[in-house]
Image (cartoon, rainbow, N blue to C red):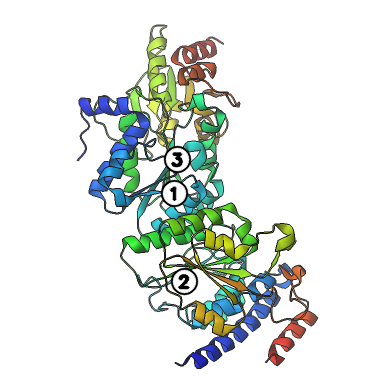
Amino acid sequence: MIEYNKRNIRTWSLLGPSGAHGTAAIELAETNPNVLMLTADLCFFSGLERFKSAFPDRLYNFGIAEQNMIGAAAGLAKEGFIPFVNTYASFCTSRCADQVRVNMSYMKLPVKLIGLTAGYAAGVLGATHMSVEDLAFMRALPNITVISPADCTEIIKAVIASAETPEPTYIRLTGPQNTPIVYKEDYDFQIGKAVTIQEGEDVCIIATGSMVYHAMQTAKLLETEGVSCTVLNMHTIKPLDIDAIMEANEKHKLLVTAEEHNIIGGLYSAVSEVLCRGGIHTPVLPVAINDFFAHSGSYHYQMRESGLSADLMKEKIIKNLSQ
Amino acid sequence: MSNEDMIKRCGEAAKRIRRNIVEMTYGTGNAGAHLGGSLSMVELLAGLYVGPIRFDPENPTWEERDRVILSKGHAAMALYPAMAEAGIIEEKELSTFKKDGSRLGGHPSLNGLPGIEFASGSLGQGLSLGVGTCLALKRKRNTESRVFVFLGDGECDEGSVWEAAASAAHYGLNQLVAVVDINSIQYDGYTDDVLNMSPFENKWRDFGWDTSVIDGHNMAEILNAYKHKGDKPFVILAHTVKGKGISFMEDNWKYHNASLTEELYKQALEELETAI
């Protein structure tokens, strides 16, 4: 049984999102005989080397052939297994778009898709390996649960929780190795239920994935300027926690959405859609990638260039409040 | 039952299936249906569904059933009457084909129709589903079931088919039987002109499959091919005629997807009636 103690949480952060994924895979294998891991020549990169040693007959490597991997996963799912499929986020979503659409969305087969290095984590490899549009695509598909965990602890919780639901699921892994820690101790994680990290009065930053930590940093910076912030971890993008958004709408004078994703189709869109339905609402300020493809560059460089770092986020919010 | 009797029985079923295909198309009115590629695979389906298939209509999720995947989903109009021959659905339901609210859509879908393992329609995906299903059977130590995947020759243009072919051989999936309906015509013309995939049999062999090239309208050859057992995945390369059985449709790309006037409908039925 996995222990959510301080030591483990620090270790998972050091291992990074892939390592956390591998840790969850071992836990699942030990507790659920139907769980299988599928990869497309990324066994080690996806953090499954320990899994491979411990459960060699439960790991399928399909080579660099992602479309076939998704189809094979659907076949395994139909026969009662729980296949976790991993590759770079861009290759398991846009590359296999039709396989995901037909097998997971249309047929509702409970394949669990793990999108590695979403956002800028693989920034040095260039735009082919940065997935900045996966939320938009996956969110538009009926029947698929979309989760974007905030840190390595939440990755483990999300992966384990996804095995317990019959829903086809996409889990988007963001953040670099030495992943910033949002949760220093155990907490209650439920798919579809946002988590309030801190409560404030003026601004509510609704953040997802890696941006939850940056939102917390931003809130600290804003505090020094007399602006009090709520930070909401919207780890599930679909189904969206509408109640949490409506509550934030009522209690604050500005909502900010923060995501390591394109400004179109992701969290900003999802939150705005909910608020528009309600008529009069608080303004929503997006912190997101402003509809462009970045060229090769380090994670932190990319984050700054896109205005996603805490200091730039703070400036944007202050500017908005003073208008 | 003797082999001769089985050949005869399957042949009679094929005749009924062809007649049903004409009726179903006419029933769609101006909408039309995929006649050519349905008529070309009638014997292949009749041979399986009246022949060796392991399927209990009373228990359609029986673990040891054979799984059938119609990867060329546009030939659903041949599949449904073949399923009726096996008693999986009632023949009277065929008249609902492509009607609003029917279980018998233009492509198979997971809408509660027994015997449909997967939805299809987007080409090039069925063989991967077959690979996953066979991996699952192996994990469950189910050595009795086979997984039949019906593909079109035009469909084999899709790269994903060859990804699946490679992985089937890699994992030694000898319960996997691919049946390629080689009617030599795809939407835009002859397959050799649109995208020449020859030498086709060599490709499958080079990907690590056992192969058998047959006349896809010869029931004796079909039933014999279905008896194959080996250590590798197995592909039946069935040479067929698009629009088979109706003179004005045979080898005519215009009948890939078409409707029938009353006059042509009557002519088609008459031809099928008088065929030996």
Q: Residues within 10 Å of mark 2 (few under 14, many from 20)?
A: many
> Residue A171 at what x, y percent from top left?
41, 39
Q: In which quadrant is the N terminus of chain A drawn?
A: top left
Quadrant of residue B254 in the image?
A: bottom right
Give amino acid for label 2.
Gly
Indicate left or right for A210 with B237 as reference. left
Q: Residues within 10 Å of mark 1 (few under 14, many from 20)?
A: many
Residue designated by label 1: A62
Disc on the earlier residue, 1 or 3: 1
Q: In which quadrant is the C terminus of chain A drawn?
A: top right
Q: Is residue A207 visible?
A: yes
Residue designated by label 2: B115
Which residue sits at x=45%, y=80%? B52
Closer to viewer: mark 2 or mark 3: 3
Indicate left or right for A259 with A152 as reference. right
Above or below, comparing residue A159 to residue B102 in the picture: above
Give amino acid for label 3.
Thr
Indicate left or right for B121 with A173 as reference. right
Q: Helix or strand or loop: what does disc 1 sit on?
A: loop
Which residue sits at x=53%, y=9%? A322
Give amino acid for label 1.
Phe
Residue designated by label 3: A87
- Give the spatial CA distance, label 2 vs label 1: 28 Å
> Residue A258 at what x, y percent from top left?
47, 24
Which residue sits at x=47%, y=59%? B129
Residues at badges 1 and 3 in contact (C-beta under 8 Å)?
no
Depth check: A196 or A33 in front? A33
Residues at badges 2 and 1 in contact (C-beta under 8 Å)?
no
**What chain letter is assigned to the residue under label 3?**
A
Q: Helix or strand or loop: what does disc 2 sit on?
A: loop
